[in-house]
Image: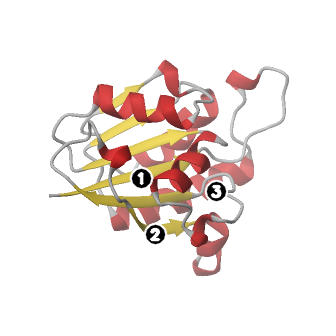
């Protein structure tokens, strides 16, 4: 059974002293809409796990405006999470879903995508705000997905889509 993990970095946010409560800015709003449309045309997540940070929640709102979320959880542990914490969140929350979307932060999102795909050269670039990657693997379960050979299906940045809008 093919499983898909989508790692989505939050959209561009305003600069501020209160990191947790920074809102996405005008560019972030535009890019999150573009990326949400792309996501919807390529996948329909069975489970969404998101950082509780305001910029992650606002990024996800662009998607939830287009897609009725089946199962969505805010996981406090995803705020500025390192790869190990992201993996723990997936294992803790996953059941029999085929596709899981994570909305989180760098450097954790980028580092996890690199480690899961054995440092795929396509990911050796800036994982800019609002970028997402689709990673797949063959397995029945999520509890050991990070030990499997994972395949990078797609890596897409907002600038890759802007020419079409």
**Whole-Å distance between the Cαs marked 3 and 1?**
20 Å
Front one among 115 and 70: 115
Callouts 2 and 1 close, C-beta under 8 Å: no
Work out whether residue 155 or residue 73 is closer to the camera in this orientation and state it. 155
Can you say whether 149 is above or below 54 in the image?
below
Query: Going by the picture, which residue comes out furthest to the bottom?
Result: 163
Left or right: 46 in relation to 63: left
Q: Earlier in the sequence, mark 2 or mark 1?
A: 1
**Circles 3 and 1: CB atoms closer than 8 Å:** no
Which comes before the other along the chain, label 2 or label 3? 3
Residue 2: image x %, image y %? Answer: 21, 60
User: What mark, if any, has residue 6 been given in the picture?
Assistant: 1
On screen, residue 29 above or below 60: below
Task: Give the Cα distance between marks 2 and 3.
Answer: 21 Å
Q: Provide the secondary structure element on which disc 2 rests.
A: strand
Seen in the image, is 145 located left or right of residue 9?
left
Give the number of marks.
Answer: 3
According to the picture, the residue beneath numbered tag 3 turns out to be: 30
* Quadrant of res 90: top left
Which element carries disc 1, helix, strand or loop?
strand
Residue that appears at 53% across and 33% down:
57
Quarter of the picture containing the N terminus is bottom left
> What residue did someone put label 2 on?
154
């Amino acid at each position: 059974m093919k499983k898909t993990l989508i790692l989505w970095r939050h959209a561009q946010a305003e600069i501020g002293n209160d990191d947790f409560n920074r809102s996405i800015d005008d560019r972030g709003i535009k890019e999150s809409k573009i990326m949400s449309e792309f996501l919807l045309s390529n996948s329909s997540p069975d489970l969404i796990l998101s950082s509780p940070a305001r910029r992650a929640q606002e990024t996800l709102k662009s998607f939830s405006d287009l897609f009725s979320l089946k199962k969505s959880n805010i996981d406090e542990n995803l705020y500025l999470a390192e790869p190990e914490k992201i993996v723990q969140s997936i294992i803790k929350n996953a059941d029999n879903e085929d596709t899981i979307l994570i909305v989180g932060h760098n450097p954790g999102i980028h580092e996890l995508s690199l480690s899961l795909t054995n440092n795929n050269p396509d990911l050796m670039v800036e994982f800019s705000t609002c970028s997402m990657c689709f990673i797949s693997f063959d397995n029945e379960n999520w509890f050991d997905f990070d030990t499997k050979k994972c395949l990078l299906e797609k890596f897409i940045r907002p600038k890759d889509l802007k020419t079409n809008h």
